[in-house]
Amino acid sequence: MKTIALLVLLMSEIVVANAADNTKHTYKPKEGYVPNEKTAMAIAAAVWAPIYGEGVIVGARPYRAKLKHGVWLVEATFPKGYASGVVIAEISKDDGRILRISPEK
């Protein structure tokens, strides 16, 4: 019985130590992970490139970014010859999640 109690105590110590260690290494900037237009545009380009092709995305510069209600709306206009016209990315300012990628018509 003492062995089981000691094992349970040891296991709970390990769990508490691991939980404390995980929070110790978590850093979140005050302005969120996507604090400015430049960062939002870089994230959008990185996500668009594998979808539409690097050349298409480079040709779609300059990008435009606006922050509204904690969400970056990043837009780019495709080069002539592409049906979609405009592509958008919605990115959470707080945590950098990609909320939506959509070609606009």
Image (spheres, rainbow, N blue to C red):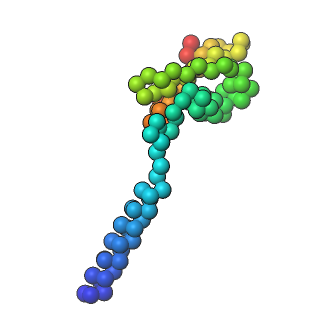
Work out which residue is located at the far bottom of the displayed protein and give it: 2
Residue 35 coordinates in the image, percent (x, y): 51, 33
Residue at image coords 31%, 87%:
3
Residue at image coords 33%, 71%:
12
- The image shows residue 22, relative to residue 81, as above or below, that is below
Work out which residue is located at the far right of the displayed protein and give it: 55
Residue 65 coordinates in the image, percent (x, y): 55, 22
Q: Is residue 65 left or right of residue 77?
A: left
Query: In which quarter of the view is residue 69 placed?
Result: top left
- The image shows residue 92, relative to residue 6, as above or below, that is above
Q: Is residue 12 left or right of residue 60?
A: left
Res 44 seen here: no
Residue at image coords 56%, 27%:
37
Q: Quadrant of the N terminus?
A: bottom left
Query: In which quarter of the view is residue 54 placed?
Result: top right
Work out which residue is located at the far left of the displayed protein and give it: 1
Q: Nearer the viewer, residue 3 or 32?
A: 32
Q: Quadrant of the C terminus?
A: top right
Residue 39 coordinates in the image, percent (x, y): 58, 32
